[in-house]
Each structure stands twice: as C-alpha cells, then as structure tokens.
C-alpha cells in the first residue's frame, strides 16, 4: 500500500478544437515515456462537429500509473479561456504555461522534475489506447476483414485498421450503416475469412437480427462494443458501463457466446486476439466490451504480438472445399443444412449448439477469467470490471487498510466458482461501477447468490477520480 501522494505528477493541456490539444498531450507523454516514466493520458472533448473546449490530462510517475489524477501540477493553455475553465483543478503551486513552443514546454517540465527530485527509470512499453491495442490483437490473430460504420468511441478501430490494409492481406470496409456492416462480415466468415465488426451500443442495437443469425448458423464473428453514456444518442463522447446486460443477452433466442471485458490497454490487446481465436475455435460470436475511457485513453503497456498463436476450427468447411456442399441458413436446420421444424429435431440442434459450453468452460479453466490485486487474505473486497480497474488500482495507493481487489474479465460465461472462492468469505464487499443499476453486482447475485449491498456507482458520464474514490472506500472500510 503506497501512501506517498507526491509520486504522481499531472499535466493538463487545454484549448479549442483544432488547436492541437491531443497532439500536444501525446507529444508530452511520448517525451516522458522515452525518459522512462509510466504514463496515463486521458482526453475530453464535446460532441461537436467543430469547436468546443478540448482537454488532455497526463499523469505520470516512475512507478505504475493506472489512472489520471484531477489535480494539476502544470497547466498548458493553448488559448486564453483554458486556465479559467480548469482553475478549480489547479494546486496552489501549479505552473501555468501558455504560448510556448513544444521544446520549451518539455524543458520547463524537465526543470520541475529536477526541482522535485523525480528521477525516471528505464523506458518501458508503448504508449497506446485500448482501441489500437484491441486492433493489434485482432491483427495478431489473423484478421482478414474489419467492417464498420463509424460511431464514437469505436471509430478509431476503423481508422487504425484502415491504415494497416495491404493488397494481399487485411481489408477494411465502411458500408452505409451498421446493419450492412454485420451482414457483410457474416458473408466474409461464410467464405472462410476472419472478420470483426465494431460500434457503440447504439450501433450494435441495429445488428441484433444478424447477431442472432451468427448464433443460429454457428458463424465465428467478433463484435467490439465501445460503450458510451446512453440510452439513445446519450452523451456520445462520454463513458459508461451500462451495456453489460445488453451484451450478455444480445440477440433474440438462446445461443452460446463469449463476452470479454478488458480493463486496460494490455488486456484489450489480448481480448482482441483471444476473441478472434475463440470465435473460430468454438464457431460462435464473441463480444469484447470496451468503453470510451478504455477505447480512447492512452497508457504505457507491454505485450508481444509474436506470442499470439492462431487457432482454427477443425470442423468448418467453406464454399469451394472439394467434395463439400456448404449451406448457411437462418432457419433451424439439421447438420446437413436442411430446414427442420419437428420438435425432436429442433431440440437436437439446440442441444448441439449448447454442447459447446462444456468446451468453452474447459477453456476458461486455462484462462485468467478474474484477477486478484492487493491483500488476497483481506476480508474487505472491492469488485469491479472494465475501465474502472484504473481508478480502483490507482485509488489503492491511498487506502488506509489492506484490501483485496477482484477484477472480473469474463462476464459470459461467468466464472462462478472462481468468483465464489474470492467473495464467499468476505465480510464487506464493495462493487465499483460506472452505471446506475450496478449491473455487475446484479450479475454476481444471479450467478453466485452473493448479495452485494455496498456499491459505489457513478453514472454522470465522467470517470472516477482515484483520490476521491479512495476517500469513499476508506470511509466504508474504516470499521
């Protein structure tokens, strides 16, 4: 437990859209990463075509930084109003910089670090956001087609993968809408190509009929859902964790699927690679739940793309396979692809599809479906999922007591036995989420019978500040 509140340093960059706020933030972060610091870089911007105030916040340290902090040590203002807009986030000794070129900004930051005796370590990892890491995971697992209609905060997946197209390899398509995107992807899969689609919750809502088609036809498809504050258009450039139940129960009818919920950029990479492999190994649709914070914020991460092993189905055949007739239909059908409607045949095929569950659960036993942080023997437990990981682990530096922290990475199928093992002996369990209904807590109750009465919920579309979260948790565990 780290109680040193001075080992994390925070820089803010503010300005109008088009003034280079994001670029300036990335340049400063890259300079600090190269100097050996661990980085967390967040971005805020309004849902406007042009204009509005943009802000980048960079927290860094020689130790691990899981989340940015609200209080600023340096404020870089690219226009006159930025300092006024962020005056409540400044410390009494915050250094304010304006009208300076990038080399002078970095020199001033270096001087401050020397004054504070903050020494860096060796350079580590890459500075990367969740969407880019997820995209690289897909590519490492052999992605052939990515098909998507742009919708914040999933759009940068489309942009990144489009920049990686090759004449004989990856192809990226932007069709006229989300319905076309998923149906085109299913066509690619039918032809034997690895395909993925991505959108926000609203875009995925349009894909439901085709998503169910993937379940009925046993077509391996990856879907990225980058959550944002909803419902409807909601707050398009803000974050939320309100699509957990939607993803688990997506589509009409019953069919197996896997739903993964990474919590940082490194886990996003592996979620992309694993999702594509799982889809093809089990011939099912696989969902990866991202969100605006995870999708667009950047952090230093380490992963090895060359370590990904591409898994393939042993039973799938495709049009053009010698001596094989390949049929795909949305109707209930037998194993030869012919439509059936007799109850005994319908039941047989439903059982066939759900028989995959045993193999999926066997896969789970070899996977890190949950992660444990902190004191594993503590009777005070914090449980969380997705991007709240950053706020919780950063808040842990300021806890007054030792706490066990449980992150759930697989939400469907749910790792019931592992969760029971970690939660059943706890005297106090606190669930931390950015939604109104505490969807993870309700899922835990449904799957394990454990009722979590202590909840810290945020549903105003803004992220948790780690120090504020620590104060709330300290208050609840003080007895």
Image: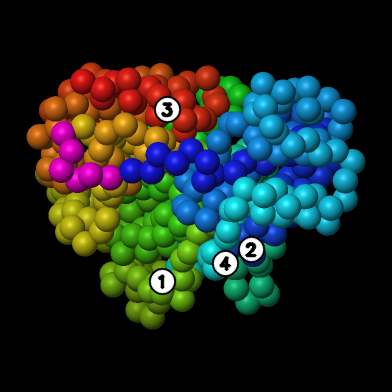
Q: Secondary structure at mark 1?
A: loop
Image coords of residue 403 (percent x, y):
25, 37
- Which of the 4 image quarters holds residue 474? top left
173 on left or right of 101: left
State the CA–CA distance, disc 2 to disc 4.
6 Å
Is 434 left, or right, of 347 in this rendering? right
Residue mark closest to the camera, 4 vs 1? 4
Residue where numbered disc 3 is placed = 469
Gap in angstroms between the C-alphas marked 1 and 3 = 36 Å
The quadrant of the image that shows the N terminus is top left
> Residue 89 occupies which quadrant of the picture?
top right
Which region is colored magenta?
Answer: 374-379
Tell me the tag on residue 123. Answer: 4
Q: Earlier in the sequence, mark 1 or mark 3?
A: 1
First in sequence: mark 4 vs mark 1: 4
- Of the numbered discs 2 and 1, the one sitting upstream in the chain is 2
Residue 5 pos. (x, y %): 48, 38
Residue 390 rendering spot, x and y as whole percentages: 45, 42
Circle 4 crowding by C-alpha within 10 Å: few under 14, some 14–19, many from 20: some
Q: Which residue is mark 2?
A: 35
Depth check: 254 or 42 in front? 42
Provide the residue designation for mark 1. Answer: 308
Report if the CB atoms under discs 2 and 4 are less than 8 Å apart. Answer: yes
The residues tagged by marks 4 and 1 sit, at their Cα atoms, a distance apart of 24 Å
Q: Quadrant of the C terminus?
A: top left
């Amino acid at each position: 437990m780290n109680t040193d509140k001075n080992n994390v340093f925070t820089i803010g960059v503010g300005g109008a859209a088009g003034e280079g706020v994001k670029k300036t933030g990335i340049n400063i972060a890259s300079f600090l990463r190269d100097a050996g610091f661990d980085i967390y870089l967040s971005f805020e911007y309004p849902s406007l075509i042009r204009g509005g105030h943009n802000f980048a916040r960079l927290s860094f340290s020689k130790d691990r930084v899981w989340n940015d902090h609200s209080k600023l040590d340096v404020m870089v203002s690219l226009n006159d109003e930025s300092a006024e807009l962020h005056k409540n986030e400044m410390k009494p000794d915050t250094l304010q910089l304006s009208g300076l070129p990038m080399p002078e900004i970095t020199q001033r930051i270096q001087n401050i670090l020397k004054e504070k005796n903050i020494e860096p370590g060796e350079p580590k990892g890459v500075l990367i956001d969740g969407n880019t890491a997820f995209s690289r995971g897909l590519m490492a697992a052999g992605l052939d087609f990515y098909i998507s209609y742009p919708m914040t905060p999933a759009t940068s997946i489309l942009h990144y993968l489009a920049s990686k197209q090759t004449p004989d390899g990856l192809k990226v398509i932007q069709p006229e809408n989300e319905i076309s995107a998923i149906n085109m992807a299913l066509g690619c899969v039918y032809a034997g190509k690895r395909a993925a689609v991505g959108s926000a919750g609203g875009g995925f809502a349009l894909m439901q009929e085709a998503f169910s088609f993937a379940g009925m036809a046993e077509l391996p498809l990856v879907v990225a859902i980058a959550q944002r504050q909803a419902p409807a258009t909601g707050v398009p450039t803000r974050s939320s964790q309100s699509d957990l139940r939607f993803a688990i129960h997506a589509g009409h009818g019953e069919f197996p699927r896997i739903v993964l919920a990474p919590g940082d950029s490194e886990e996003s990479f592996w979620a992309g690679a694993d999702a594509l492999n799982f889809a093809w190994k089990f011939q099912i649709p696989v969902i990866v739940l991202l969100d605006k914070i995870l999708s667009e914020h950047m952090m230093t991460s380490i992963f090895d793309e060359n370590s990904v092993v591409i898994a393939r189905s042993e039973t799938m055949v495709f049009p053009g396979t010698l001596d094989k007739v390949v049929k795909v239909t949305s109707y209930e059908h037998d194993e030869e692809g012919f439509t059936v409607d007799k109850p005994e045949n319908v039941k047989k095929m439903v059982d066939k599809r759900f028989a995959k569950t045993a193999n999926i659960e066997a896969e789970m036993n070899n996977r890190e479906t949950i992660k444990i942080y902190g004191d594993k023997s503590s009777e005070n437990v914090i449980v969380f999922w997705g991007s709240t990981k950053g706020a919780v682990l950063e808040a842990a530096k300021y806890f007054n007591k030792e706490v066990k922290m449980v992150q759930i990475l697989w939400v469907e199928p749910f790792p019931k036995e592992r969760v029971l093992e970690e939660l059943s002996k706890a005297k106090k369990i606190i669930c931390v989420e950015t939604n109104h209904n505490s969807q993870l807590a309700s899922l835990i109750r449904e799957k394990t019978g454990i009722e979590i009465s202590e909840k810290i919920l945020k549903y105003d579309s803004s992220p948790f500040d780690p120090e504020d979260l620590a104060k709330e948790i300290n208050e609840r565990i003080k007895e």
